[in-house]
Amino acid sequence: MRNRQSLTVCLLAGAALLVAPMIAQAGGTIKGKVTFNGKVPAPKEFAFGKFPNVEFCKKNPSKSADGETRLLKEVEIDGSKGLKNAVVAVRDIKDKAWMGTFKKAPSQEVVAKLCEFLPFTGVVVSKGQFKVTNDDADADDPKSKEGVLHNPHSFDVLGAKSSTLFNIGLAKKGSSLQKTMKLRMAKKGGVVRLQCDQHEFMQSWYLPVTNPFFATSGADGTFEIKDVPAGKHKLLVWHPLAAKNAVKKAIEIEVDVKDGGTVEANFDIK
């Protein structure tokens, strides 16, 4: 898979001064759009009948026309080829104080809903907390009335290497787990994968970050990161399909952020 990136820099500070008084502003904004111009892969297919809680999991809207197959759409684009679920992050800042705030509070909260982990992509902080909550229960099934059993299994992944971070069953609706993420491969470009051992089609991915300057692209591929410290920064865009097992395969560019200004960074993935 080849990656191509384009960067358009647009400073709006001058225009802002025409309509606002001269007020000191801390940092600037990075905004833009991530597009996907490659061949969109077909969704992965999983027969509902091969997994537990068949009728309940069929309530998930991502399924075949006959309702018998779960479709896992790893790449989602809109009419303008905007790519959803790409994570854009500033990579050259390590904010230890910010990272330390997640020793007790979760840096990422994931919900199992209708047999799907949400969000599909997000972030994780090394040595920070990570939380997963089960929101599923099937009132029509006596065995699952109090909860549909999900078994979140997370992996520290780098290329062909992977190791388990946690593997814990959540049997009841409202039950949750919260674990410290000791990411041994994050410095080398590793990422985190989450999968349910009960329902293989429940999969999601998380990028390790070291500062609060990140965003996830919306349904139209756009993103915005505010209050970025002024200066030149390395900006990375990562998506599970484009760089599934290693950050080093992601696109990285340089942006120059000005106080009170806006830098436009557009990424084109093939």
Image: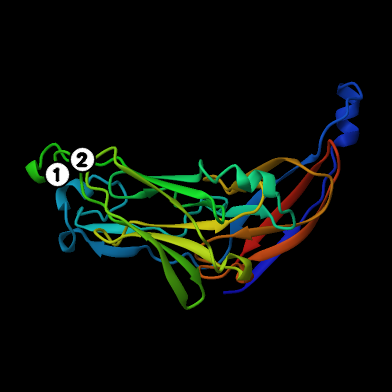
Which residue bears the numbered disc 2? 137
| Amino acid bearing label 2 | Ala
Q: Residue at x 56, y 56 (%)?
A: 126
**Number of residue marks:** 2
Decide which of 180, 118 is in the foreground and name it. 180
Q: Identify the image quadrant of the N terminus.
A: bottom right
> How was this image coloured?
rainbow
Quarter residue 11 falls in: top right
Q: Earlier in the sequence, mark 2 or mark 1?
A: 2
Q: Is residue 183 above or below residue 85?
A: below
Local crowd size for mark 2, using a 10 Å CA cut-off: few (<14), some (14–19), many (≥20): many
Q: Are marks 2 and 1 in contact (CB under 8 Å)?
A: yes
Residue 14 x/y as whole percent: 91, 34
- State the CA–CA distance, disc 2 to disc 1: 6 Å
Query: Horizontally, is 231 left or right of 88 in the view?
Result: right
Is residue 112 at all visible to an observer of this figure? Answer: no
Q: Which mark is on residue 239?
A: none
Residue 99 x/y as whole percent: 62, 48
Give the structural element (helix, strand or loop) at label 2.
loop
Residue 37 x/y as whole percent: 58, 63
Q: Is residue 254 above or below residue 249?
A: above
Decide which of 199, 269 is in the foreground and name it. 199
Q: Residue at x 82, y 45 (%)?
A: 10
Query: Horizontally, is 73 left or right of 199 in the view?
Result: right
| Amino acid bearing label 1 | Ser
Quarter residue 151 falls in: bottom left
Query: Horizontally, is 205 left or right of 1 in the view?
Result: left
Local crowd size for mark 1, using a 10 Å CA cut-off: few (<14), some (14–19), many (≥20): some
Which residue bears the numbered disc 1? 144
Q: Identify the image quadrant of the C terminus.
A: bottom right
